[in-house]
Every structure is written in structure tokens, then in C-alpha cells.
Image: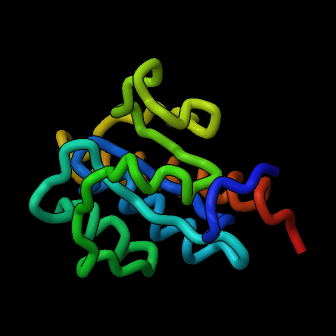
Amino acid sequence: MREYGKAGKKVLFVCGENAARSQMAEAFFNRLAREWRAESAGTFPAEKVNSLAVRAMEEVGLDISSARPKALDPGRLCEFERIISFGCIARAAFPARDRLEEWPLPDPGKGDMGLMRRVRDEIRRLVSSLVEELEGSD
């Protein structure tokens, strides 16, 4: 695998507001991964993490209540070997297209708790598969 930066072994999750999907993915990834780390960012970050996302993650034992939405910093893209977008990046204009993949999930911030839970569970499944791919299993 290519080295993109000094940090290496990092994944970036990106969604529009960095208020739900990417925050949940970052939390699941960092709980499951041993050798890799994740960060998250938004293309238009919200002022705070979605309260339904906080509640949904509490239900599975993860506290994201102190997380804060962060803006996507194109200058830091070299730090990440994998970049996962939840449908908020214009692929043709993105400078790190070779490391970008899409997980097209609906924005649960526009729905109710049922949608938030369904998206959370799908993110958990996708993140688990990604961690297995990157780190293998014991």
C-alpha cells in the first residue's frame, strides 16, 4: 500500500454536516480498529452533532456527545490512506480520487429515530467489514 503521509494507517469519513453518519463511522471504526485510526469531517459542518445520532450511539454503548463537527481540510488529505464519503463529495473535482470511495446512505439527520437506527446499523456493518479488510482477523 502506498504511503500518503507520515501518519499512515488513517481513514477519513466525510459527510455533509459531520453531524451523524461520519461521526458514527468514526466512533465505530476507532472502537474496532487496533492499528488504524479514523477521523471525520464535513463539507458544510453543522454547529453540533445531531442529537438523534448521539442517542442512537448511546444505545450501542458509544458516547459521541462531546464530538464536534469539523470542516473537511483538503490540505490534510495526504494523511489518509482511505477516504469514505457518504455522498457529499463531487468525485470529479476531488483531489484524492484514488483513495475515495462512496457509501451512499441516506442522511438520517433529515429523518426520525427509526431511520437513524437503520443507518447506524448499516454503518456499523460497513465499518466492521472495512476494519476486517484493513487489519484482518485474529
Q: Tell me if 4 is positioned left or right of 104 in this view.
A: right
Given residues 11 and 76, the one toward you in this image is 76
The one nearer the camera, 55 or 45, is: 45
Q: Where is residue 28 in the image (x, y as percent from the top left)?
A: 52, 67
Query: Which residue does the image show at 54% across and 46% down from the upper left?
Result: 83
- Looking at the image, residue 66 sits to the left or right of residue 137; the answer is left
Q: From this view, report whether residue 18 is shown above or below residue 55.
A: above
Q: In which quarter of the image is residue 80?
A: bottom right
Considering every residue shown, the one lying at the far right of the view is 138
Q: In this view, does 37 lie above or below 130?
A: below
Q: Which of 54 and 48 is in front in this view?
A: 48
Residue at 64% across / 52% down in the picture? Answer: 81
In what quadrant of the picture does the C terminus appear?
bottom right
Question: Which residue does the image show at 24% across and 78% down from the upper left?
Answer: 65
Number of on-image labels: 0
Colour setup of the view: rainbow
Please state the horizontal and vertical placement of residue 60, each as a whole percent of the image: 45, 73
Towards the viewer: 137 or 89: 89
Q: In this view, does 49 lie above or below 46?
A: below
Q: Residue 130: horizontal and vertical position, in percent?
A: 68, 53
Q: Which residue occupies the extreme top position in the image?
A: 92
Q: Is 104 placed above or below 136 here?
A: above
Q: Could you say where residue 79 lies in the image, as x and y percent from the top left?
A: 55, 59
Q: Is residue 21 left or right of residue 39?
A: left
- Farthest-out residue, left: 47
